[in-house]
Image: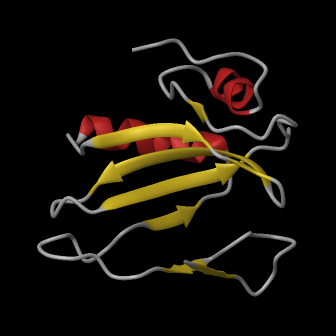
Amino acid sequence: MVFMTPDPELDDHQIALAKGREGEAKIIGHIAWRVETPADVKAFYEQFKAQGVPIHHCISHAYEEMGNTVSCYFLDPEGNRLEVYALVPERDEARINRPLDLDKSVDEIIAQASGLVQAAAH
């Protein structure tokens, strides 16, 4: 796998290239859209739920270069996995991925993504 970015200070990658899948696998592996704030991610999440869009999972990714994310993965009508994400200002020095509960307030979501509190199990 190869990760490419025009600005490694801003993003660890904007394009990732990987070997194709065998057989009947979906063509698209993953597409992500970066939005301005965690509140924007929550708004997309709420809209997806209201419209019956399948939510795959919600997670905070921890990247050394750019910090932590609030990420919502969802499925398009063909079953491709897509993501909407935003960076959080606080960094979790443990740099581990954490599940998120996007039904919480934006402040609580940011605290989860920063490793200050854990998401409740659903």
Q: Is residue 90 left or right of residue 54?
A: right
Q: Quadrant of the N terminus?
A: bottom right
Total label count? 0
State the image quarter where residue 36 is shown.
Answer: bottom right
On the image, the x and y values in percent for residue 106 come to 64, 28
Residue 17 position within the rendered picture, expressed as x and y whole percent measured from the top left: 50, 83
Which residue is nearer to you in this view: 117 or 22? 22
Q: Is residue 63 left or right of residue 41?
A: right
Answer with left or right where residue 5 lies relative to residue 41: right
Nearer to the camera, 61 or 34: 61
**How far from the left and from the top, in percent, is residue 99?**
54, 30
> Which image quarter holds the C terminus?
top left
Displayed quadrant of residue 117: top right
Figure check: 65 above or below 25? above
Extreme-bottom residue of the structure:
6
Please give the name of the residue rendered at 60% of the width and 21% of the height, measured from the top-left corner. 105
Q: Is residue 25 above or below residue 72?
A: below
Who's the residue at 81% across and 58% down the image? 66
Which residue occupies 64% across, 42% down? 38
**Relative image position of residue 84 (x, y in whole percent):** 50, 55
Q: What residue is at 55 percent from the left and 19 percent from the top?
A: 104
Q: Is residue 48 above or below residue 82?
A: above
Furthest residue to the left? Answer: 24
Color encoding of the figure: secondary structure
Q: Is residue 41 above or below residue 103?
A: below
